[in-house]
Amino acid sequence: MTIPSSESHAEFLERMRRQFDFGPYPRYPIDMVPREVGNELFYLNLTTPAYLQKRRVVETADKVVLDAGCGTGYKALAMAKANPGAKVIGIDLSPRSIELAQQRVAYHGYENCAEFHVLSIEDIAQLGIQFDYINCDETLYFFDDIAEGLAAFKSVLKPEGIIRANLHSALQRQTFFQAQELFNLMGLMEEEAEEMAVPIVIDIMKELKPEVFLKKMTWNPKLEDPDQDGNKEFLLANQLLKGDKGYRISDMFDGLRRADLEFLSMVEWRRWNLTDLFREPDNLPSYLAMGLSESTPETMLTIYELLNPAHRLLDFWCTHPRQGPEPLPVAEWSLGDWLNSRITLHPQLRTEAVKEAALEAIQQNGPFIISTFLSLPTLSPVTISYDVAALLLQLWNGPQPFAALVNFWQQTHPVNLLTLEPITPEAAAQQVADALGKLEVFLYVLPEQMA
C-alpha cells in the first residue's frame, strides 16, 4: 500500500482503520436490497466470469466466495444473493464496518451463509480457506505494489478460482488526485482531521469561481449540503481519500505478471471495445486496422485508455495461468457442435420481472427488449422477437439440451413461411442456433458442450 516514508506499515493500516471507522463505506442503509434485476448481481455472480473463462456453467451451491475489503457488507450481501448456496466471507480492517456488515446480513436473513472477520488482506491466509471467487472492490489501489495484494489473493485461490479487482484510473481520476494533494497540503488529511475537513472542503469549493479548473472538474453543487445523505461519504472517498493512487492499463498487466496471474477480461468488457470509438467500426483506418489484427489485449486496452480515459475504474477479472487449449468460441461452432450442447439462461435473467415482460411480449406478439434487464454486456438496446422470448422461457426451470429447444421450435414454427413446406429438423436447428448465438455474445444464454 502507499505508505509515507515516515510511517510504518502498521501505522498506515491503523490510519486506514481509523478513516473507515470514522466514515464506514459504503453508507447504504441496512435495509437497502441489492436489485435482482440489473448489472450488479451479474458481475458478482461466479457464473459470469467462469463462463468467460472456460465456456462452462458452474453451480454456485457449496462455492466459497470472499469479499476482501467488505466495508459495511453491501457487496457481501449482493454476493450472497447472486450466488445461491455459496458461503460468503468478508474481511475488513475496520471493526465498525464489520459490525455493520454483520447487522446487514442478519437483517436480510443471510447470517447463516455469511461471516466476517477484522483482518487485513496481507493476513488472509490466516483464515485457512481456499476460495472459488474473490471480490476486491475499491481496495487494491491502496497498495503501493498491487502485485503484493494480487499474490495474497492467489495464495488462497482454488485452481479454477477467479479474482475480480479494480484500480483507480490514473488518467480519468487525475483531477481528484490534485484535490487530494491540495487538501493534504492544507492539513485536512492529517490524523483526526476528518470531522472538521468535510465542512472546510465544502466551504472552499463553494466559494471558488465557477471557472476554476478544479471546481469545474471535481465539484457538484449538490455536495454543498453537508447533511445531505451521501455527501460526506463522497468527499471522504474522493477529495479526502487517504492513500489513493492511480494506475494505467500497463500497471495492471505488470501487476498480474508479477503475481503470476492471467488476465481474463475487463468486467465491463463491452465498454472497453476499441472499435466502438470509431464512426465506422467495420471500416477502421487501414493503418490502425492492420495493427490491431495482431495486437494483444493489453495493447488494445492501452490504446482505448489513451483515446478515451472515461472509466474511473480499471475493473478486471483474472485467474491462475490457464492450462490446455482455449475453448472454441461459440461464434465458430458448427451445427454439430450446437447439437451436442446444453443451453442455460443466465441466472440473473431468471427473475419474475423478466418472466412477466417476456410473457407480455408473447401475448402481444411484440418485441422483447431483453437488455432492459441486463445492460452491462451491451452498448445498444438488444431486442428479440416474441418467439425467441418463448424459446428462452423453456430455460426458466433449468438448462435444456439444444435438441429439446429445436423440438420446441419445430412445434411453434411447423411451416417455412416462404415455401409453405414443413420445416426440416436441420432448418429448425439452424434457426435456433442463429438466435441463441446472437444472445450468447451478451451472455444472456450460456451454451456449453456436453461431455
Image (tube, rainbow, N blue to C red):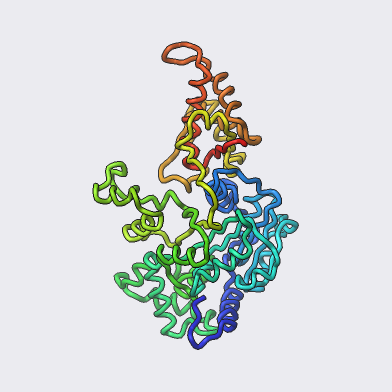
Q: Position of residue 355 (x, y in %)?
A: 59, 35
Residue sitting at the far left:
286
The image quarter in which residue 224 lies: bottom left
Q: Can see residue 163?
A: yes
Q: Identify the residue shown where x is 50% and y is 46%.
A: 326
| Up/down of 319 relative to 241, above or below | above
Q: Identify the residue shown where x is 59% and y is 34%.
A: 342
Q: Position of residue 86 (x, y in %)?
A: 69, 53
| Up/down of 413 relative to 254, above or below | above
Of residues 387 and 142, which is closer to you in this image? 142
Q: Is residue 197 left or right of residue 281?
A: right
| Up/down of 202 relative to 5, above or below | above
Q: Identify the residue shown where x is 61% and y is 75%.
A: 21
Q: Position of residue 34 (x, y in %)?
A: 60, 53
The image quarter in which residue 448 lies: top right
Q: Quadrant of the C terminus?
A: top right
Of residues 448 and 260, which is closer to you in this image? 260
Residue sitting at the far right:
112
Q: Is residue 216 left or right of residue 257?
A: left
Q: Can see residue 78?
A: no
| Up/down of 33 relative to 202, above or below | above
Q: Position of residue 82 (x, y in %)?
A: 62, 50
Of residues 270 and 96, which is closer to you in this image? 270
Q: Identify the residue shown where x is 65% and y is 51%.
A: 81
Q: How many marks?
A: 0
